[in-house]
Image (cartoon, rainbow, N blue to C red):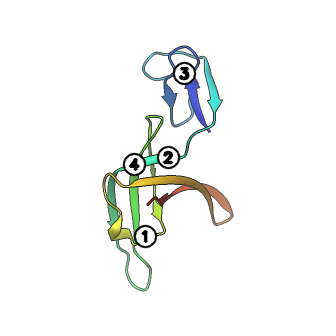
């Protein structure tokens, strides 16, 4: 779910009381497509035996950008422009949004 202004149609992420660009306070929750494109990425390498992981900035189809990670591919195989799809995962018993690479 994402917030969207009823009057301007602008999407907002992270959740707020008002739309940043216009100050509109008519935000409503709407379903997000889950589609996105990797805008930026980096690989975080930790001391072995801990595995490396990626951190990605994903441009959502609706417009906002979201920091997360891409799963299902090696961290070094995540590329700018890669199509991804969001899903809800769990870490330490808490839900979080991650992305899967799309063909």
Point 49% across, 24% down: residue: 10
As helix, strand or loop, the secondary structure at mark 3 comes to: loop
Quarter of the image for residue 26 reads top right
Return the residue at label 1.
Answer: 73
| Residue 18: numbered disc | 3
Quarter of the image for residue 82 reads bottom left
As helix, strand or loop, the secondary structure at mark 1 comes to: loop
Please state if 84 lies on the left or on the right of 78 as rendered. Answer: right
User: Is residue 72 positioned above or below 86 on the image?
Assistant: below
* Name of the residue lying farthest toward the bottom: 49
Label 4 to label 2: alpha-carbon separation: 7 Å
* Name of the residue lying farthest toward the right: 93
User: Is residue 24 positioned above or below 61 on the image?
Assistant: above
Point 44% across, 36% down: residue: 64
Return the residue at label 4.
Answer: 37
| Residue 65: numbered disc | none
Disc 1 versus disc 3: nearer the observer: 1
Across and down, in percent, residue 8 comes to: 50, 16
Return the residue at label 2.
Answer: 35
Q: Are marks 4 and 2 in contact (CB under 8 Å)?
A: no
In which quadrant will I find the N terminus? Answer: top right
Q: Do the residues labelled 1 and 2 touch (CB within 8 Å)?
A: no
Callout 4 environment at 10 Å: few (<14), some (14 to 19), or many (20+)? many
Q: Earlier in the sequence, mark 1 or mark 4?
A: 4
């Amino acid at each position: 779910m994402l917030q969207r202004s009823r009057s301007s149609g602008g999407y907002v992420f992270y959740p707020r009381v008002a739309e940043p660009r216009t100050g509109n306070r008519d935000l409503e929750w709407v379903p997000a497509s889950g589609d996105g494109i990797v805008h930026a990425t980096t690989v975080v390498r930790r001391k072995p035996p801990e595995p490396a992981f990626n951190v990605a900035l994903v441009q959502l189809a609706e417009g906002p950008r979201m920091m997360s990670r891409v799963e299902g591919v090696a961290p070094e195989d995540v590329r700018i422009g890669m199509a991804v799809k969001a899903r809800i995962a769990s870490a330490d018993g808490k839900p979080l949004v991650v992305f899967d690479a799309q063909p």
